[in-house]
Image (cartoon, helix red, strand yellow):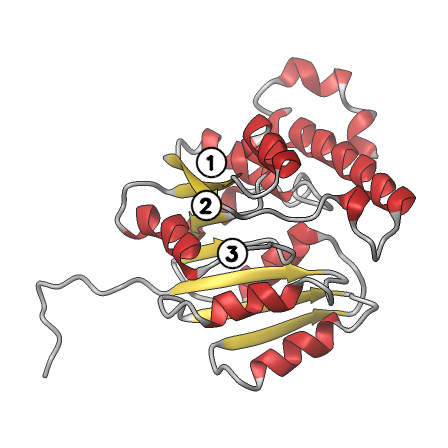
Amino acid sequence: MPDNPLQPRKPLIAAILPTFNEEFNVSGVLEVLRATSMLDEIILVDDGSTDNTAEILNQTATIDRRVRVIQHGKNRGKGQAIFSGWAATNASILLLLDADLKNLNPEHIQALLAPVIEHRADMTLGLFHGGHRSTDFSHWLTPFLTGQRGVRAELLKYVSRDAAAGYGFEVALTVAAGQQKFRTRVVALKGVWHPSSEYRTERGYWNGNLTRFRMYGQVIRAWVIATRERYPKAKAFFSDISKY
């Protein structure tokens, strides 16, 4: 039977999952992505992992034809991993997730994507709720840092590549959405959480804290770079900071 010309066609939807040394966490997220039928493509980007992450991703590609794996020869940062995934798809709507999520399910993914699919928002921000006290607090304190988003793919062309380097992608994306006046909507991800950097057993306590401090530094750098053209007086003041 031919398609009803009055029935709008579902847009092409792609999930992009950047990964780096997530062999102990990524399998759960992969399972949920594969169980979500509304996804047309699942693009897994291994950002130069030195553990077994790449093997897990490639194994997933053999059992789900929607899955494609992109591998970086060396670690290039989360922002570049997402840009690599975006370059590999023509989807008009993207799902962006962190690779270490706990208690994620297909209903959470639907909640992130539905407002964008239904033109009620251009971007959603998924915030943890009721999963783990520490991650709940940090998410609601700094919602612009969440890595869980549904977004119209065209927004990524406005994101500063410089600002998005390292851990700066979410800040750069949030700033771009504000500058382009994209409509955003908060979505509560009930029960979802992820391990904090300092409590990741595979990293160790001190390496975890070092990762956290590095992340905060890159977040500040991203905010400066992404906004300095809009606020030129701040450009000179922060010019040295933005080099690091």
Residue where numbered disc 3 is placed: 104
Q: Quadrant of residue 222?
A: top right
**What type is the residue that disc 1 sits on?**
Ala
Q: Is residue 65 above or below residue 172?
A: below
Seen at 72% across and 78% down, the residue is 55
Q: Position of residue 79 (x, y in %)?
A: 65, 50
| Residue 12 locus on image (x, y percent) | 35, 65
Amino acid type, residue under disc 3 in the picture: Leu
Residue in view at x 44 percent, y 40 percent: 188
> For the image shown, how many numbered marks are present on the structure?
3
Q: Please tell me whether mark 2 or mark 3 is closer to you in this view.
A: 3
SS for callout 3: loop
Give the side of residue 220 with respect to residue 226, left or right: right
Q: Dots 2 and 1: beta carbons under 8 Å?
A: yes
Which residue in the rendered view is the most extreme toward the bottom?
A: 62
Determine the residue positioned at 65% across, 56% down.
Answer: 100
Which residue type carries mark 2? Answer: Leu
Q: Quadrant of the N terminus?
A: bottom left
- The residue under label 2 is 155
Q: Which mark is residue 177?
A: 1
Q: Which corner quadrant of the image does residue 211 belong to?
A: top right
Q: Decide: few, some or many residues near mark 2? Use Cα within 10 Å; few <14, some 14-19, many ≥20.
A: some
Mark 2 to mark 3 CA distance (whole Å): 25 Å
Q: Residues within 10 Å of mark 3 (few under 14, many from 20)?
A: many
Q: Secondary structure at mark 1?
A: helix
